[in-house]
Image: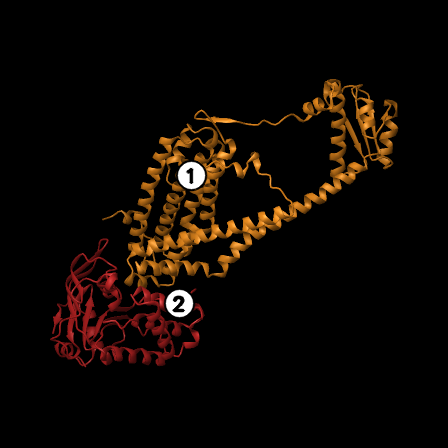
Amino acid sequence: MYTTYMKKPLVHIQNFGLTIGDKQIVKELDFDVFPGEVFALLGSNGSGKTSTIRSLLGIYQPTAGTLHINGAPLTPEVASMVGYLPEERGLYTRSKVLDTMVYFGELKGMTREAAREFSLDFLKRVELEDKATVKVKKLSGGQQQKIQLGVAIMGDPKLLILDEPTKGLDPVNRRLLLDIVDELQQKGTAVIYITHLMEEVERLADRLLILKDGKARAYGTVAAVKKEFKSSSIEDIFVKIYKEKSHEVSHV
Amino acid sequence: MSKLRSVIRHEYLTIVKQPSFWIVMIAIPLAIAVVGLFVYFGNQSSEDHIKEVTDNLRNVSIVDESGLINKDVVAASGLTLSPGRDTTTLREQVRTGEKDALVVFPTTLKQERKYAIYLSSNDLTQIGSVTSLANSLLKTSLFLPLGSPEIITLAQVGASGDVTVFKDGAPSGGFNDYIAPGIFLILFYIIFAFSISFMLTSVSEEKENRSMEMVLTYVKPRTLIVGKLLAVTFVTITQVAFFGALALIALLIFKQFGGEIALPLGLDLTKMTLDPMVIFLSASYLIVGFLMFAGLMTATAAAAPSAKEANNFSSVFFIGAFLPFYFITMLATDPENPIVQFLTFFPLTAPVVTLVRNTVGNLGMLEGWLALITMTLFMFASIWIAVRAFKLGALEFSQTIKLSKLFKK
């Protein structure tokens, strides 16, 4: 479990604000993510979770504040330290499985050989080694999700961002994914885990942040947040926050 | 740099590995070859039929009431002149099929310039042959008093002009000046027809299959766009090389069988004029035009939420590229016309118009450079718009990015 509070944060977000067009998506957001922890980023649809991640990854330009990974804003040049499984995810359906994985590996800064070796090992692990030369569009939805996960964890990322990773997965594949997350955490990878499934938060997360209308409403270790809200269930806390008209951040 | 290389390789291989890419590449020259063979054998067969009909034109009677037809000319054709009083009988024989045809030159021929032909069937070849025979008899009879056969032939057929055009005080290549810049015009249309839409497909596909966000995590939008542009450029080079190789093979096979290719307007590839400035300008218009349209295609694909909508929007650019052909005569003959001037500098029509005008040689040096500078500015603008639309629209999956939003800070 989480024991790294005193470490230097891998992700440091301070006073972050994002406005797109006339709409303010995120306001004055602060949080840290430490190496080796699973950090749950929670909130209903439109609360600003995905926009925060896109800003952290340099896809969106923040209108205020700083978003640092390993002490600096992320640029594509050093993006190899990040694995990202977005909510809106997909693969090149007309390309072959191995070609697709190798391409993403190269984009992450791996050599072709290293990307190929990793891909073949991963396909073997998830029992898709016979699909290496099959076009992605020929795979089932679950098989494609396994490949997407493989792409996300290529190159041993220091930070893994998973946006609703178990959406649409059957129990077997869900277990496989959670095992992989466990393994990476053991190796010291920081995981930002976005989900609507509170039982996954209870099982995996060391700390959490609940966003509502682009503002942090609860932030801290799972146990501390429960204590602060006098509840034994994250789901109850989530519902309580969303039923309230406004609530100041509870930073534990 | 290595990421750019990866993008180029991925985009290039994604396109050229598609079976549909090669099917189109092979189907088009194949269709041209099949149509060519049909036309060739069709003509061959028609020529044989015409010869057969002409050879059988013995059962034709000629009646001359005008007094203009020379009996020796008729005799030289293997026929004889029949007297005018036999006209009714001969016409009846044609009607019943005893005779193939009857030609009657009436007394009013000089005034009305009309003669009558009666035929036993509606065979088009026979109609053509008898008409041609009648005309030939009339013309040769009329020209006969001129004297020698050479003069008669000259009077009948006319002569062709051997054109020498002076440019800047020295003889130029005439129509052969058109060949080199004309090749760039053809290349532009090959690129437009086959390659430019790959930019649209490539971006639309990444949006539709939702791989865009994963890609943008690791690659800057500018790198991605430049990579795609270069990949499409290499695809175009592949296509041109493939078509060029096919054309060369076809030419060699054709020559092997003793065939000769007659180009229109008396063009002669061996006399192709290579003016460095004309070639430089044409090449520049081609490259700048390609990049401008590619940028606009990228912007359209990035701004539209789906490939279908992107395709609908992109039709505007296709209209721009083909519109100048409605004004082709004006472009070639009336360069000072305000419409021509407008089309020369209007972004969507400028590439084709400058290529056409540079081909026919009516684009002045100053005008040519001004057009190139203007097009280059449009090209940078279109790439800027593409990057901007890409940043705003690459991850917008449900609605089209408004034009006003593109220019908002």
| Residue A243 placement: quadrant | bottom left
Type of the residue with mark 2: Asp
Q: Is residue A201 above or below residue B158?
A: below
Left or right position of A227 against A103: left
Mark 2 sits on what residue?
Answer: A99
Front in this rendered view, residue A23 or A89: A89
- Which amino acid, by three-letter code, is at mark 1? Ile
Question: In the displayed structure, would residue B337 be above or below residue B33?
Answer: above
Q: Is residue B165 left or right of residue B336?
A: right
Q: Is residue B201 above or below residue B263?
A: below
Chain coloured orange in this rendering: B
Residue A183 image offset from top left, x and y in percent: 26, 80
Q: Which residue is mark 1?
A: B279
Point out the frontmost of discs 1 and 2.
Answer: 1
Toward the viewer: B349 or B153?
Answer: B153
Q: Is residue A239 left or right of residue A175?
A: left
Badge 2 crowding class, 10 Å Cα cut-off, few under 14, some 14 to 19, many 20 or more, is many
**Nearest the eye: B406 or B189:** B189
Q: Chain ID for label 2?
A: A
The disc numbered 1 marks a residue on which chain? B
The kind of secondary structure element at disc 2 is helix
Residue B405 visible, this orientation: yes
Query: Residue A86, how many percent across, how many down?
Result: 30, 67
Q: Which chain is red?
A: A
Q: CA–CA distance between discs 1 and 2?
A: 41 Å
Check the picture and name the quadrant holding the N terminus of chain B.
bottom left
Frontmost residue, B265 versus B382: B265
Note whether B195 is above or below A250 in the view shown: above
